[in-house]
Each structure stands twice: as C-alpha cells, then as structure tokens.
Amino acid sequence: MNHIRLGVNVDHVASIRQSRGTPYPDPVLAAFLAEQAGADQITVHLREDRRHIQERDLEVLRRTVATELNLEMAAADEVLEVACRIRPDMATLVPERRQERTTEHGLAVAGEEAGIEPCIRRLRDAGIRVSLFVDPDLATVRAAAALGVEQVELHTGFYAEARGARRAGELERIRAAASEAGRLGLCVAAGHGLDYGNVRDICLIQEVMELNIGHSIISRAVFCGIEEAVREMMARIADAEAGRE
C-alpha cells in the first residue's frame, strides 16, 4: 500500500505577516519546521494580488525545500512567467477571483481546454509537473485527463462544509471522481477545508495518494507549534490508512 503524502500549505503564515507588514512570521521557516515533522511536500499559492505569499518567498522556498514544492497558481501570464523561472516541482492550476477569501470552486476544464492547454504546455516544457484543482465531477476529470496532466486535486470544500446526508452525498461524489481519475491513469490528490476531524473519510478512498492541507494545520499550530500540528495530522492520516481495505 502506498503512503498518502501530506502537503502542508503555509500561505496563512504569510497572511499573518502581510496583515502587519512585518518581516515575520516567515513562511520559509514554517515550511522547514513542517518538513522536520515529516511533511512530504510544501504547498504555496502565489496569488495575482500577492495577498500572502510573495515572489521572494517562492524564490527562497525553491532553494530550501528539501521535499517537493507545489505552487498553486492561476493560469495567468504574469504568474506563469514566475513559475517557469523558479521551477517548482509541481504547479497546481486553480481558479482565482480577487474578491474571494479562499478558492471557492475547482477549475472549469470542460469547454475551456483552449485557454488552459498553452499554460500546461509551458509549464511542462519548463520541467514542471502539472496538477489541476477540480471539482469532483466526472466530466471535468475526463477533460483533465484529455489535457495530459499528471494529476488532479479534487476539491473537498463542499464535503467539508456539508453535514449529515449532504456530506455523505459529497463524499460519494469525491469517491466516484477519484475512481474515474484512477481509471484514466491520473494521480489523485485532495484538498480544501480538510481538518483533523473530517480527513479520515477522504483517506479511506483508495485512489487518494496526496492531501494538501493548510488552514487547519496552521490554526492548530497557534496552540501547539507547527511541528506538533503536522505530526498530529500525519497520525490521523496513518490511522485512516490502516483502515483501508
């Protein structure tokens, strides 16, 4: 059985820094501590409005991350140029609206291939693996596979926010999308809104091999430190993995 990789998103460390315009807290140090605790990947989102992560953060992270660096980004020319210059290990294309607090939906792929494909091609030509952050929708997963990307990351936000029967329905959507992605030869990641309480059911999905989690880990770290917060999440993931068939 393959180990579920944990990507720790350190954007919110930068959010605290940017709120006061100070040089601290440093997301680079947060990334180092997360790796020391066993994180398999560091994830950051370089937004067009630079609300948290800055280009300098990305440059330093590229030199210091010992595991893998995953850059979340819009398919925008200016960010694309930065990505191709810095060359993270993976780029995850996400939709982006300046008025949103956080990413609200997956990337629209079906019917938008002509706009996305040139961005994918430029990233791959730069030696960067490409993942698409998508809603757990079968048509979208199929469209992503047709574009030749290596991975899809399934948006788990609707599942995380739902309760009762609605949550069960959202979980089934994720299961079905993950199964289809696996059948099509895609690596399957999941992320958005995952926390210490709801991560287990996602981990039980056979095809899910990577999780990207930020807000809940950084929130927990306020009280116990980043290393302990990461270890606690990894323990939840390991416990769930043990329950896989």
Image (cartoon, helix red, strand yellow):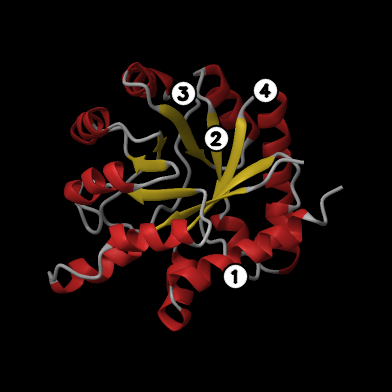
Depth check, mark 3 against mark 4: the one in front is 4
Side of 77 relative to 109 (left or right): left
- Pointer 4 local density, CA inside 10 Å: few below 14, some 14–19, many at least 20: some
Observer able to see residue 47: no
Residue that numbered label 2 is attached to = 152
Residue that numbered label 4 is attached to = 184
Which of the labelled discs sits on residue 111, or is there none? 3
Residue that numbered label 1 is attached to = 232
Mark 4 and mark 3 in contact (Cβ < 8 Å)? no
192 vs 215: above or below: above
Residue in the image at 71% along x and 41% along y: 2
Q: Distance between the residues labelled 2 and 4?
A: 11 Å
Name the element at disc 1: helix
At label 2, the amino acid type is: Val
Name the element at disc 2: strand
At label 1, the amino acid type is: Glu
Q: In which quarter of the image is residue 168?
A: bottom right
**Of the image marks 1 and 2, the number of the one nearer the N terminus:** 2
Residue in the image at 66% along x and 65% along y: 235
245 vs 126: above or below: below
Q: How far apart are marks 3 and 1 (CA)?
A: 41 Å
**Of the image marks 2 and 3, the number of the one nearer the N terminus:** 3
- Pointer 2 local density, CA inside 10 Å: few below 14, some 14–19, many at least 20: many
